[in-house]
């Protein structure tokens, strides 16, 4: 209770009011008591004077003591007070309440002593005769010549005054207590009014601390608390705006990190992972959520990467190296950077995936080596023939003719290779524009198959085309194609199927519609393609089986891929080694408007 501002304000007020009440009650009752006693004293004084006058008229000789006592008793009744008359020796000669003969000498009473000395004496004390407190006032009884011949004393009990004073005290105390209570309530009310907005502010601040920033205080007052409320609202607006800006920035950074191709990973001073983006999780082959909080060394488990990270933390400098994580794993460039000069041990690790770049590099190297190899074979043949002719075969016309035919064949091979290379390079650089027109699939498939039919028969293969005929429902829609180019693709695929299928095999050409595409496939029961070679057969000069590919250039599938992609289609192959291969390519269906020009 004492911890609240309300108590701090109200309690001192209440204590102050109570103290004032007590002091006021004591002081005012004392003043009243003094005033009552003064009044009583002057009343008793007047009455004593009356008694003195009455008794001094009686000459001592003519009035016996019992005559005085009777008078005193009579005066006592009249005055409703205790009246006593005492002679100069202190002997009581008359008393309104008691028998004077039984009373002790009164000379030692203080008021009697003063009166005997000629003055008015008064005293307030406990009456042993009557058994309660009394006020006594005594005055001297004088003769006409002024001689003191006794003392007239009048007394009244103080119980009445004490009762009145007590009653007065209760009245004052009651009134002031009531006032104190009202004042206390008022103090509590005022304190409540002052502290209400403060308590509201405290509630709001606690809500803000828990993350709820929407609360505001409504205040119209211009006092200190009102200004505090306004300042609080301004602060809340500011904090909310800043937090929203920070949220937006964080979301932006999160989006950037999430969509980055490079892996980003941050470790703290203890070497635990504090952040990693999806790319980093993918490249390291770990679960993104589970990885946060893990030890970097336990998570990465690649001694090259952990080595770079460790050295970067030791020397506090940026380090970068390329790392090969294994045959099937990515080839990475790893850059480790100390996060900041201040945050000791915190480190940013960037993982750049160079696998694709390295693959392209390998393709380029293979291309150069393949083209050299392909050119060398016919050139070596030519050289050998020329040498043989020069060494004397020229003299033998029949042999010379045979050798000339060989030269012709080798030149044809070279010419074919150069023609295909040129065509490939023209297609690749976009110099061969496609003349697209809605075309029936049969018109693209049947002519090349018919042309290659004799070759298939020579190789002992049966060849079949199986297309949903135009009469059938749903039938094949027209495709948007440059017929000459697509026939080149079909020729290449069927030619390969014949070339790589031993006698007795089967080559089947199928076509079907799939959504907005028509998919053509060439299926054979030939030697198949090893799984390792399958992803690479569409590269230039790539040959899976050099021994059997014979005079092939290794450029056919590469050209086919470019032509199909130029049509907006895809080309791919499936194969089981020893069982056969299927090559697929897709072409977009011609829209109705285009199909019926
Ligand atoms: P090539 O002139 O050698 O036929 P291609 O580009 O047409 O060149 O083919 C590349 C390689 O793909 C071939 O050398 C062969 O190893 C493989 N290949 C293509 N088609 C088939 C197939 N139907 N069956 C088995 N291997 C094939």
Image (tube, rainbow, N blue to C red):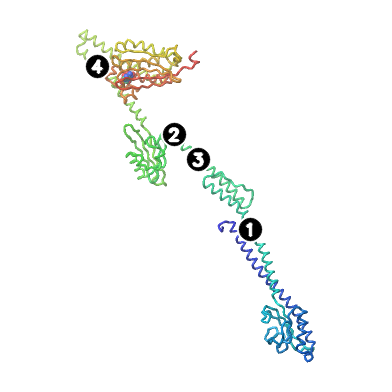
Q: Earlier in the sequence, mark 4 or mark 3?
A: 3
Q: Taking 186 as reference, is 546 left or right?
A: left
Packing grade of label 4 (10 A; few <14, some 14-19, many >=20) is few
Q: Earlier in the sequence, mark 3 or mark 2?
A: 3
Q: Looking at the image, is 204 positioned above or below residue 5?
A: above
Q: Earlier in the sequence, mark 4 or mark 1?
A: 1
Element type at mark 1? helix
Residue 187 numbered tag: 1
Q: Residue tagged by mark 2?
A: 259
Element type at mark 2? helix
Q: Earlier in the sequence, mark 3 or mark 1?
A: 1
Question: Cβ(mark 2) to ligand 1 < 8 Å?
Answer: no
| Mark 4 or mark 2, whichever is nearer to me | 2
Residue 465 position within the rendered picture, expressed as x and y whole percent measured from the top left: 37, 13
Q: Earlier in the sequence, mark 4 or mark 2?
A: 2
What quarter of the picture does the N terminus occupy? bottom right
Q: Residue tagged by mark 4?
A: 383
Element type at mark 4? helix
| Mark 4 or mark 1, whichever is nearer to me | 1
Q: Taking 267 as reference, is 80 left or right?
A: right
Q: Residue tagged by mark 3?
A: 247
**Does any portion of residue 554 appear in the rendered image?**
no
Distance from the alpha carbon under mark 4 to that under mark 2: 57 Å
Residue at the extreme top = 397
Distance from the alpha carbon under mark 4 to that under mark 3: 75 Å
**Does any portion of residue 520 appear in the rendered image?**
yes
Packing grade of label 3 (10 A; few <14, some 14-19, many >=20) is few
């Amino acid at each position: 209770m004492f911890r609240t501002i309300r108590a701090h304000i109200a309690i001192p007020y209440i204590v102050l009011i109570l103290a004032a009440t007590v002091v006021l009650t004591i002081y005012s009752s004392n003043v009243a008591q003094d005033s009552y006693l003064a009044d009583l004293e002057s009343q008793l004084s007047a009455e004593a004077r009356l008694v003195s006058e009455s008794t001094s008229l009686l000459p001592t000789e003519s009035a016996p003591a019992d005559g005085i006592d009777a008078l005193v008793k009579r005066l006592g009744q009249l005055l409703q007070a205790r009246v006593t008359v005492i002679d100069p020796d202190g002997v009581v000669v008359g008393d309104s309440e008691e028998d004077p003969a039984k009373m002790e000498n009164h000379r030692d009473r203080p008021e009697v002593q003063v009166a005997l000395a000629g003055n008015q004496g008064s005293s307030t004390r406990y009456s042993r005769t009557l058994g309660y407190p009394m006020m006594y006032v005594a005055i001297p009884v004088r003769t006409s010549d002024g001689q003191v011949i006794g003392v007239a004393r009048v007394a009244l009990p103080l119980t009445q005054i004490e009762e009145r004073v007590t009653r007065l005290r209760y009245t004052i105390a009651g009134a002031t207590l009531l006032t104190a209570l009202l004042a206390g309530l008022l103090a509590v009310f005022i304190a409540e009014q002052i502290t209400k907005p403060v308590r509201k502010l405290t509630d709001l601040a606690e809500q803000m601390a828990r993350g709820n920033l929407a609360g505001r205080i409504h205040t119209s007052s211009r006092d200190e608390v009102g200004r505090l409320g306004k300042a609080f609202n301004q602060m809340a607006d500011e904090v909310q705006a800043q937090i929203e800006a920070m949220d937006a920035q964080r979301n932006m950074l999160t989006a950037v990190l999430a969509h980055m191709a490079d892996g980003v990973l941050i470790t703290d001073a203890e070497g635990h992972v504090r952040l990693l983006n999806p790319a980093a999780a993918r490249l390291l082959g770990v679960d993104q959520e589970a990885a946060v909080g893990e030890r970097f060394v336990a998570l990465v488990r690649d001694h090259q990467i952990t080595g770079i990270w460790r050295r970067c933390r030791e020397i506090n400098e940026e380090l970068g190296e390329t790392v090969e994580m294994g045959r099937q794993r990515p080839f990475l460039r790893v850059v480790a950077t100390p996060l900041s000069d201040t945050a000791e041990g915190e480190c940013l690790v960037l993982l750049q995936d160079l696998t694709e770049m390295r693959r392209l590099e390998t393709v380029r190297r293979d291309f150069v080596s393949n083209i050299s190899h392909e050119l060398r074979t016919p050139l070596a043949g030519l050289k050998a023939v020329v040498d043989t002719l020069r060494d004397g075969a020229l003299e033998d016309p029949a042999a010379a003719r045979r050798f000339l035919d060989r030269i012709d064949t080798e030149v044809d091979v070279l010419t074919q290779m150069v023609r295909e290379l040129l065509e490939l390079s023209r297609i690749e650089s976009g110099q061969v524009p496609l003349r697209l027109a809605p075309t029936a699939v049969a018109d693209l498939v049947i002519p090349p198959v018919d042309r290659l039919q004799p070759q298939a028969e020579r190789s002992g293969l049966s060849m079949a085309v199986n297309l949903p005929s135009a009469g059938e429902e749903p039938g094949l829609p027209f495709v948007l194609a440059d017929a000459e180019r697509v026939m080149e693709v079909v020729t290449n695929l069927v030619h390969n199927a014949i070339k790589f299928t031993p006698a007795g095999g089967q080559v089947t050409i199928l076509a079907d519609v799939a959504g907005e595409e028509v998919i053509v496939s060439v299926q054979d029961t030939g030697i198949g393609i090893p799984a390792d070679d399958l992803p690479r057969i569409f590269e230039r000069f790539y040959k899976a089986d050099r021994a059997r590919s014979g005079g092939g250039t290794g450029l056919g599938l590469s050209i086919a891929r470019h032509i199909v992609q130029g049509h907006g289609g895809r080309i791919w192959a499936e194969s089981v080694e020893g069982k056969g291969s299927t090559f697929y390519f897709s072409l977009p269906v011609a829209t109705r408007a285009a199909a019926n020009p």
